[in-house]
Amino acid sequence: MPDGPAPLRAAQPRVTAHESVHSTLRRAILGGALPGGTRLVQADIASQLSVSTTPVREALRDLAAEGLVVFRPHVGAVVRELGLDELVELYDIRKAIEPVSIRRAAVRIGKRELDEAQKLVKEMESEKDPARWAELNWEFHGVLERAANAPLVQSVVKTVQDIAAIYVAHSLFLQPDRMASGNKEHRALLTALRRRDEDTAARVLVNHLDSTLQAILKSRSEISQVGKADRVGRPMAVHR
């Protein structure tokens, strides 16, 4: 006879249609597959993902709350797009807030976070696909933010990082060399964190953000020059 009941096994977590749609759209936006200005038609998305329009509508509302999507009158949901002045303002915010977080991370980061960040850096160094690189970049900075153990700062940083991620991914398709320079900057940042050098980590991060902003602004300038006549009255971002 058995000594007792069989051990219980945790059930596999179920993913709802809403969660699946939200995750799919979010990844597509942050990875650059859906650049800023792209119209998100509920019926089309539902058809592509084989779901009803209800979870799509719920997912779009969540993405709007996260700042990745906006709702425009007579148009519907659109991937958020910033003007040049707003982009500069966004990066001014990042350069003001993120050094606070990275300084905390330099003091608090542990071996597990360092190893995770190191693994992501290695993946980025071997990655050739700009969309995937942008996704890994977002994950890398997320690891460092969590290591800072500053929930209030992290919530603000995550919002601006998510919005910026749309433009980072898009710029990489036009300037793939930025991936190589970004990899070097990530290495330098990781080295400073391993040494628990707060000042160097903050300085490297600010320079990294400056370089990223310049790459984004350059890519938008190139887009404007190539197709200005064809985009009169349309968002600057490439539509797919």
Image (cartoon, rainbow, N blue to C red):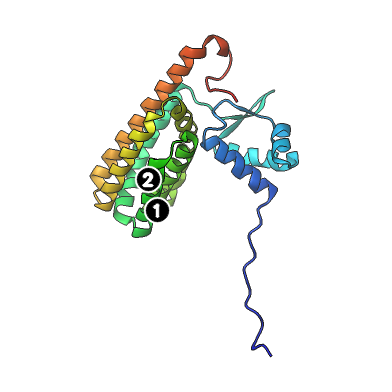
The location of residue 112, given as percent across then percent down, is 38, 58
**Mark on residue 42?**
none
- For the N terminus, the quadrant is bottom right
Which residue is more in the foreground, 119 or 44?
A: 119
Where does label 1 land, which residue? 116
Q: Amino acid at mark 1?
A: Glu
Please name the residue that numbered disc 2 is placed on: 121
Q: Is residue 227 above or below residue 105?
A: above
Q: Position of residue 73 (x, y in %)?
A: 67, 24
Query: Which badge, 1 or 2, comes first in the chain's sequence?
Result: 1
Horizontal placement of 89 versus 52: left or right? left
Instruction: Quarter of the image for the C terminus: give it.
Output: top right
All told, the count of numbered labels is 2
Quadrant in the picture for residue 183 = top left
Going by the numbered disc 2, the residue's amino acid type is Val
Query: Marks 1 and 2, how far apart in space?
Result: 9 Å
Asked if residue 61 lies left or right of residue 127, the reply is right
Dot 2, how many residues are within 10 Å of its Cα: few (below 14), some (14-19), or many (20+)?
many
